Amino acid sequence: MRNYYYFVATLPWVTYGDAPPKSSGAFREECAAHLAPGDAALLQYCTYNVAVAMGNAQATGSAFIDALLARERTLLLNLAHLRAARLKRQLPGEPPRDASDAEAAAKAAFEMGDPLEAEVFLDRGRWDAIDALAGIDLFSVNMVYAYLLKLQLLERRQRFDTEKGFAGYKGLYDTILDEYNASSGGGA
């Protein structure tokens, strides 16, 4: 595993709930200048994009990234199964089980009455998983990947707005109910 002593040493410290010191996009650009091409190529997997998490079951070459993708897949699939069960629907297969906290986190977040509280809880769990899986080599490429993922969580946290979130949630929920009622022949 390659180390990036100078680059990592120049990164401002971040803690959960802080304002991001730079955008994740700007950091990706910095990474392109400092990382070896093979390490830089793996930055595409350092995201909380659902399509990336669900579409990549292949090994990336980074145990850290693979573990985080597997955790995110487990979290998302467990949430999907819980939501389907609430709607009296069944998804094919069983949701994945894991030794980490993703399955338990999905269940705990699902039971929360406040969607914002649930999202903050899930993101805090993501942050803790990054810290747990990154390892102890403070200058490794894993710390660069971890930093990018943390910046994305901080950016996401800044976009949380209770009123907009509730309006979006209500609109999405109404759309789903309308589609369900139309497909089942039922009425509101």
Image (cartoon, rainbow, N blue to C red):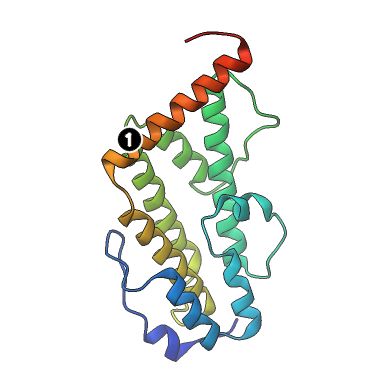
> What residue do we see at 59% from left, 56% from top?
69
Secondary structure beneath disc 1?
A: helix
In the rendered image, residue 18, in percent from the top left (x then y), is placed at 27, 63
Residue depicted at 44% across the width and 24% down the height: 174
Image position of 59 with respect to 84: above or below: below
Residue shown at 63% from the left, 69% from the top: 62
**Residue 63 found in image quarter:** bottom right
Instruction: Say what amino acid the circle numbered 1 marks.
Output: Phe
Residue 172 or residue 135, whichever sits in front: 172
Q: In the picture, residue 40 is in which quadrant?
A: bottom right
In the rendered image, residue 33, in percent from the top left (x then y), is placed at 53, 87
* Horizontal and vertical percent position of residue 64: 57, 66
Q: Is residue 81 visible?
A: yes
Circle 1 packing at 10 Å, graded few (<14), some (14-19), many (20+), is some
Q: Quadrant of the N terminus?
A: bottom right
Q: Is residue 15 left or right of residue 58?
A: left
Q: On the rendered structure, is 60 left or right of 188? A: right
Q: Relative to the observer, which residue lies in front, 31 or 93?
A: 31
Residue on which disc 1 sits: 166
Q: Residue furthest bottom?
A: 6
Whole-percent x, y for residue 50 in the image: 57, 50
Q: Say whether residue 136 is visible.
A: no
Residue at image position (41%, 31%) is 171
Count how many numbered circles sit on residues in the image: 1
Pick the residue in front: 89 or 98. 89
> Would residue 95 appear left or right of 24 to someone viewing this image?
right
Task: Name, please, the residue furthest toward the right.
Answer: 58
